[in-house]
Image (cartoon, rainbow, N blue to C red):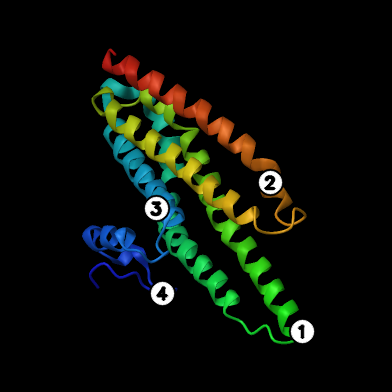
Amino acid sequence: MGCSKGGGTMNWMDMSLRDFQAALASSSPTPGGGTAAAVALGQAAALTCMVTDLTIGKEKWQEGWQIAEDALNAAIPLMGRAGELATEDSDSFDAVMACFKMPKTTPEEIEARRNCIRQSTLKAAEVPFETATLALSLLRHLPDLAEKGNGNAASDVGVAALLASAAVKGALYNVEINLSSIPEDMGTHMRTLSPDILEEARTLSRDSMKSVNSRLGL
């Protein structure tokens, strides 16, 4: 498909990495930043799984076995869900664009179009909000995994934490841009919780980097 971006039925996880990056690079709005944030979450979860596998059952890292088990249980479902969110994110944007194309010649059509735009935009905020929430749930395990997991894979935990942090922050940008275009009484839970999610992610990311740097002797 070259650099063209697909429509709402495209499942980005079925593409090669090369084709996905080409799609991301093209001028079409989808896939965009929200999809990239969800993919980053999936990569963070996959790296977390790798590190836990290198920790559990290894006598030298026995102190980190339970931490790794907990991180593994959190990461496994996120790999699949992140892929779904990547597709849902671009689908939700396409749905917003479809609403803008609705007719607006009568008062009834104008009202129907307005409601469609608002509801689809709300959905377009809810998808990245889930991405951010799930990325935060993964990030909560990473400072301890960096500290007690297999020391030879400490740098991999660091990359997982950076990707999870990027997923949180990038997804929240997409939440904000969508919520800013609809009435303030819509999406109130996202408006309320987003600042706390962002602040916790920043703290956990710093804690993860501190643990990684310590393990690496930096």
Cα distance in 3D space between marks 1 and 3: 37 Å
| Badge 2 vs badge 3, beta-carbon distance below 8 Å | no
- Check disc 3 and report the residue beneath it: 36
Is 27 in front, or is 115?
Answer: 27
Is 193 in front, or is 63?
Answer: 193
Cα distance in 3D space between marks 2 and 3: 22 Å
- Mark 1, secondary structure of its residue: helix
Q: Earlier in the sequence, mark 4 or mark 3?
A: 4
Residue 97, position in %: x, y? 54, 72
Tag in front: 1 or 4: 1
Residue type pointed to by label 4: Gly
Q: Earlier in the sequence, mark 4 or mark 2?
A: 4
Which picture quadrant has residue 120? Answer: bottom right
Relative to 178, 81 lies left or right = left
Is 123 in front, or is 52?
Answer: 123
Q: Residues within 10 Å of mark 4 (few under 14, many from 20)?
A: few
Q: Residues within 10 Å of mark 2 (few under 14, many from 20)?
A: some
Q: Residue furthest top?
A: 217
Which picture quadrant has residue 156? Answer: top left
Residue 141, position in %: x, y? 46, 32
Residue 38, position in %: x, y? 43, 52
Q: Quadrant of the N terminus?
A: bottom left
Tag in front: 1 or 3: 1
Tell me if residue 56 can be seen: no
Q: Quadrant of the C terminus?
A: top left
Tag in front: 1 or 2: 1
Cα distance in 3D space between marks 4 and 3: 16 Å
- Check disc 4 and report the residue beneath it: 7
- Check disc 1 and report the residue beneath it: 108
- Check disc 2 and report the residue beneath it: 191
Residue 142 higher or lower than 24, as above or below: above
